[in-house]
Each structure stands twice: as C-alpha cells, then as structure tokens.
Amino acid sequence: MLIQLIKPEFEELIEAKDWVGLKDVLTDVPSQDIAELLIELPGDIAVVVFRLLKKPVAADVFAAMPSGKGVELLELFSRQQLNDVMSNLEPDEQVAILEELPGHLTQRVMNSIDPQEQVQIKKILGYPEETVGRLMTPRYVRIKSDWTIERSMKHIRKYGEIAETLNVIYVVDDSEHLIDDLRITRLILAETDDTIESLMDRSFEALSVYDDQEEAVKMFAKYDRVALPVVDTDGVLVGIVTVDDIIDVAEEETTEDMQKMAGMDALDDYYSQTSVTGMVKKRVRWLILLFVGQMLTVTAMSAYESVIAGAVLLSLFIPMIISSGGNSGSQAATLIIRALATDDIRSNDWKKILKRELLSGLMLGALIGVLGVIMTSLFGIMQGQELAEPLILTSVAIGLSLLGVILFGNMSGAMLPFILTKVNLDPAVTSAPFVATLVDVTGIIIYFSIAAFLLKGVLL
C-alpha cells in the first residue's frame, strides 16, 4: 500500500521539520491516506501539515478523518483555516461535521462559513436525523424539457463546475417539480437541435427528504445508480444523494449492527478513537444484563440438584447441550436479521419462516442428536462403563435433549427478530449473547427434565 511506503519518510520529514520536503511528498498522496497519516499526529503538528495542503485537498482530508480527531483540529484551527476547510466541503459533508461538534465549537464553525452557505446548511440541518435530507447536496444541474440539447449543454458547462456529479442531469418543470432524469451520455450523443423532451420517458426513481437513510442504501443497491434525486412532499427537486455518501452510511449501519449483535451499544466513533472509559460505558450495561440472565441458569440447575447428584455423568455434558442450542439460535438470528435488513424477507413473512425454521431445527437437532448418542456411548465405554441400560438411557437422554435444545434455539433465534420488529425495536439486539442466554436457561430445563424422566428408577 502507498501509505506504508511513504509513512517512514513522512515521519522523518516531520521530525526534521522539513516542511518544504513534506509538501512535495504529499502532493500526489490521496487525501484518504493523508488523513490516515495525520490521525496519529499530535494536534499542533497536524495543524501545521494542514497549512501545507491545497485548500480543496485539505477539505477532503478533513472530511476523511474520524469525528474525534476532527473536533481536536477544529479547536486549533484559525478562523481562516476554518473558512478554507469548510468552504471547500460539500454541504452534506459540512452538515455531517457540524452534527458531531460540541455546542461551543458549532457556533465558531458556523461563523466561519459564508452567510449564503449557512442558509443551505441550516435548511439541511432542519431535516430529522438519519433521514435522506441530512445526506443530500443542493449542488446539481437541472434543465427544462423544452430546451434544446445545445442550450442544455451550454447550461451544463456554465454550472457543472459546482455540481457534485454530472453523471445524471435532472429535468424539472416551471415549478421545479422533478419530471425526469437523464444520463449525460444521452445528451452528448444527441443532435444539438433536438429538444430534451425528445429524450425523455418521464420515468425516474427518487428519494424523499424524509426517507430513512437505510432506505437510500437499498435504493442505490437495487437500481445501481451513482446518484439519486431527492424531492420534498410536493415532488419538488431539492437535492441529490451520491453513492459515496451511501457507501459511508452502509458501512456505519453494518458496523452498528455488528456491534449490537455482539451484545453492546454501538460506538459513537471508530474503535481506535474511542477511549477506554467510553468503551467500558458501551459494554458494561449489557454485560451486567447478561450476567443477571445467566443467574437464571444457576437457578434452573439448582432445581435439578438431586438429578445431578444421582447421575454425575449428566453434568459433564451440560456445556455441550447448552452451547449447541446457543449456536443454533445464533445462526438462525443472524440469518433472519440480515434477511430483514436486506428486504429479502418482510416482517409479515414470520409464518413462512416459522415453518422453515421448524423443519430445519428438527433436521439439525436430529442429526446432532444422533451424533450425541454415539459420542456419549463411546465416552462412557472409554470411561469403563458397560453398554448397558444406564449408559444407553443416558445417551438417549442426551440425544433427545440435543434435539429439543437445538430446535428451541433455532425457533427462538428466528422469531425474536420478528417480535422486536413488530414492537419497533432494533432486531440486531436479538444477538448471539441474548439468544444464548435464553437458550442456556431453557436448555437446562429441557435437558434435566428429559434425563429425570428416562433415568427415573435406573440411576435416579
């Protein structure tokens, strides 16, 4: 990687305070790599490096930084540096930065932005958090249907420089309602005296400013677009969302879901930028909850103390029984949560999923149960026991318990996401730790209930 090649030279030049040499080195380095190099630097040194960068590059570097480091640098920037960085950012990037800032710094940054841009930013900030309105940029090119191709191309050349993308050109009526979108290639290949109307089919896909950002991710994936228009409730074109912003959202949402599925609150920043104290706060609440949940397992086991005392062999297989159920439940929960997130299945498909997971749970439980009977029998023989009624019944008890626990784990892992979705909660919290805790308690009850029934009068 390029960053690994230039990092030693970068560090040497900084140590020698050779700013001229450093400026030359950074000339051809991508902004994302520069941001990665600056993350590890003290704030005062990073600010000096920023002064070496061209204004557009400095803005791109800043936009690529984690929010924690960005706040640190903004505290150190002069008013001119603030203006240089913020004025070269897209409106949606400006909004994303302002959302992360503490109150005292927000006003200072806003004061450094041109009044006209402040109006745009305040308008975008007026939309609810996590909506498409917070992602869009008002920098796009729009044309009219009665224009000729020649007039349209002149307009594009005049205003295209400030647009975030020219891949798609938007057609609006006299009231600014979106009526079509055209790829720029269609205009380039058309005759100059043709009208825009001749190229239109009045078919387009658009996002609403109030759509959830996750809906935008799905739309981009479905229609394979580099940009999508954004309209208000009246159909008026108010902005566009580009694929680079959607990639960031998709990464954030995936990271958040993975962290929740690990049984913790999602981090507010990158792992490397989160303090140890902050990490503990995100994890301790859920660990306490899971710990209390595991106490139910102890309570369940204490109810079968006499069974354990009468057949010590049973206690040896407790970890195998409950972990099998937990693994099955975690698999099912992960599959269903992901399928719901990608719209592969809907919340009203729960009956169909119930049948599928009932069948798959029975098949998996039967296969693992038979394996459990064989392994338990072999283990008993290796321990010097005869293949007689006590060992056979113990093996059968373990096999049936595996069937029951895996079936229950499969069903609970599959159904909990639907239940949480129904009550408007995030299904990601039905993650491996929670399903495992639920199955642990239930697994103990299933296991010892079956064992007590089969071994009564034999070992008990």
Image (cartoon, rainbow, N blue to C red):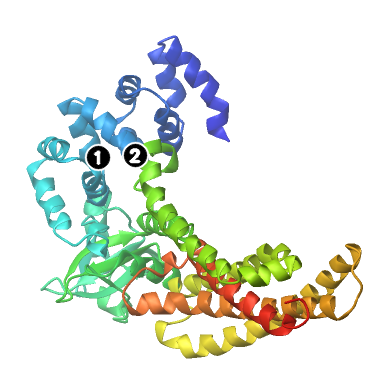
Q: Residue at x 40, y 11 (%)?
A: 17
- The image position of residue 282, as x and y in percent, is 37, 48
Residue type highlighted by circle 2: Asp
Residue 157 position, x and y percent, is 26, 53
Q: Residue at x 12, y 35 (%)?
A: 108
Q: Quadrant of residue 79?
A: top left
* Residue 293 vertical placement versus 456 (above, below): above
Q: Is residue 21 above or below residue 296?
A: above
Determine the CA span between mark 1 and mark 2: 8 Å
| Crowd tier of the residue under label 1, counting other residues whose Cα lies within 10 Å: few below 14, some 14–19, many 20 or above | some
Q: Quadrant of the C terminus?
A: bottom right
Instruction: Provide the residue designation for mark 2.
Output: 60
Does residue 343 appear in the picture of this structure?
A: no
Residue closest to the eye, 131 or 118: 131
Q: Amino acid at mark 1?
A: Asn
Q: Which residue is mark 1?
A: 88
What residue do we see at 22% from left, 49% from top?
95
Front residue of 339/148: it is: 339
Q: Give yes or no for contact between labels 1 and 2 (Cβ–Cβ under 8 Å).
A: yes
Secondary structure under tag 2 reads: helix
